[in-house]
Image: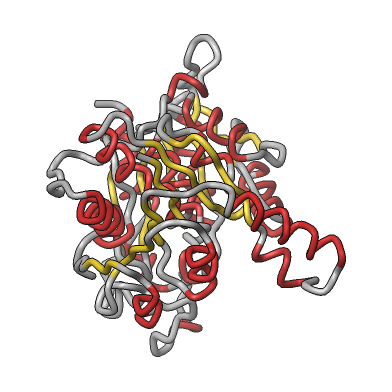
Amino acid sequence: MRILIVKTSSMGDILHTLPALTDAGKINPAIRFDWVVEENFAEIPSWHPLVENVIPVAIRRWRKNIMARETRFEINQFLKTLRSTEYDLVIDAQGLFKTIWIALLAKGPLCGLDRHSAREPLTSLFYRRRYAASWKWHAVTRLRSLFSQALGYSLPDTVADYGIDRQRFVDGDEEKKYVVFLHGTTWPTKHWPEAYWIELANRVNENNLTVKLPWGNEEERQRAQRIAASCSSAEVLPRLGLTEMAKVLAKAKAVVAVDTGLGHLAAALNVPTVSLYGPTDAALTGTVGESQIHLSASFPCSPCLSRICTYPGAEQSLVQPPCFATVSPAKVWEALHAVSFP
């Protein structure tokens, strides 16, 4: 049985889908998946043993220059690859209009979430089969439920298994002498205060561990440099691809992360992780896996699910965003110690 998954982004959403594949493989060991995914994340599906073909798409890049000859050529090649296989089932695991056209052009019966469950409800009009998944469930559970209904088995109650062989990212002896700080994220409200990162880095240093600081853009690189300048053992990493980043995470003693896709990658690799949540809800989109600790802000408006802080008087707060004043470096260190030094 061959299934096509349409789930193009983001990093966290893609990682959230992997346990559903593992579930399906336990029921039907012969099942195989192809996966349409944004080119920047194409490595991730290939890490799962049941994914045979990864079909990269470049929606984000194509939109910027849709009329260019090169763009039209790439789109034609993508469509040729997409339509070269007749699938037993096509699962739109994204539920967005930006991806529904891909699912419709693939060959095979199309299914997805119903109008009460999909992120963009009208996409459900295009599915041959529609399934419900409660918004009260974590994203991982919603996806496991979608796949179980589409493929005809009961929703497992087991711990999510991402299916990634962690050893593929570990060359020789595991180092486990450093902590990774995943300080970069997209929303301004998700950022833990820089002064807190510096204080935590020095606590890690005092316990004979080093800190490794990855980055993905210039703003993050500069923040990493400022943190490293205030801590003698901190190291700013070069810019890394996903596989290189996975190798750094897999060998870490622990990770501290804001709400970011790389935090979910750490969880998928079963690396002890302390994740920090201000505006977002850990119950719905927090990291899932072994040795995961969630520290959520305890604030009148948390979780607000907003990219912009609208709390009255927020601009006068010494901590930005002010909800993170309830997630102090001391509290994070206590959690890190608990998860890393049992």
Q: Most extreme residue toward the right, as rendered?
A: 69
Q: Is residue 336 above or below residue 66?
A: above
Q: Residue at x 21, y 65 (%)?
A: 133
- Whether 31 is drawn above or below 104: the answer is above
| Rendered-image quadrant of the N terminus | top left
Is 290 on the left or on the right of 262, as rendered?
left
Q: Residue at x 23, y 66 (%)?
A: 131
The quadrant of the rendering that contains the C terminus is top left
Give the side of residue 121 with respect to residue 159, left or right. right
Position of residue 5 relative to residue 254, above or below, is below
Q: How is the image coloured?
A: secondary structure
326 left or right of 85? left
Q: In this image, 25 relative to 12: left or right? A: left
Q: Position of residue 163 (x, y in %)?
A: 36, 32
Q: Nearer the viewer, residue 241 or 224?
A: 241
Percent of width and height locating residue 104: 49, 67
Is residue 129 visible in this depiction of the protein? yes
Foreground residue among 191 and 103: 103
**Looking at the image, which residue is at 48% across and 76% down?**
307
Give residue 124's position: percent from left, percent from top: 34, 76
Q: Provide residue 233's location: percent of width, then percent of height.
A: 59, 31
Count the marks. Answer: 0
Q: Quadrant of residue 285?
A: bottom left
Identify which residue, 273 or 124, lies in the foreground. 124
Q: Residue at x 16, y 39 (%)?
A: 158
Is residue 40 in view from this perspective? no
Residue, far bottom = 312
88 or 11, which lies in front?
A: 88
